[in-house]
Amino acid sequence: MDEYVHLVYNLTRRFPREELYGVTSQLRRSAMSVVLNYIEGYARLRKKVHKNFLEISYGSLKESKYLLNFSMKENFFLESDYLTAMKLADDIGAMLWGIIKNIEA
């Protein structure tokens, strides 16, 4: 997850200046939310609360994936960068989904 957040930050450094408070900010926030909610979930002792934080993390991942797709279509970065980010995001998504499904509610 750490690699994903750093990749997003590196990609967004190249975004147009007028997107600083738009897509740049939103994409960084959603990518950071993936890892922060994952960490916070593990700090919780109750399974339902833990699962909830993991679901929030998964939702933020989906949000960041949309924003990456949008940004690629707006030519903010290359398709090769997009494919690298999507591979990482898909791996994280599979891991999160596996954990979520294995937690008894």
Image (cartoon, rainbow, N blue to C red):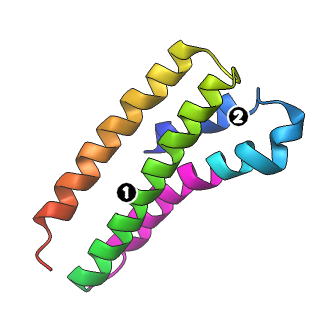
Using the rendered view, name the quadrant where residue 48 is placed.
bottom left
Residue type at mark 1 is: Tyr
Residue identifier under label 2: 12
Using the rendered view, name the quadrant where residue 45 is placed.
bottom left
Residue drawn at point x = 61 percent, y = 24 percent: 73
Toward the bottom, the furthest residue is: 46
Q: Is residue 5 visible?
A: no
Q: Position of residue 14 (x, y in %)?
A: 76, 26
Q: Which residues are magenta?
A: 28-45
- Which label was assigned to residue 95? none
Residue drawn at point x = 48 percent, y = 37 percent: 3
Q: Tell me the distance, in whole angstroms, between the alpha carbons under discs 1 and 2.
A: 21 Å
Dot 1 or dot 2, earlier in sequence = 2
Residue type at mark 2 is: Thr
Q: Position of residue 59 (x, y in %)?
A: 42, 58
Magenta segment's dominant SS is helix
Residue at disc 2, secondary structure: helix
Residue at disc 1, secondary structure: helix
Toward the right, the furthest residue is: 18
So how many labels did they put on this image?
Answer: 2
Q: Is residue 10 visible?
A: yes
Query: Up-down: is 85 above or below 80?
Result: below
Residue drawn at point x = 89 percent, y = 38 percent: 18
- Which label was assigned to residue 58? 1
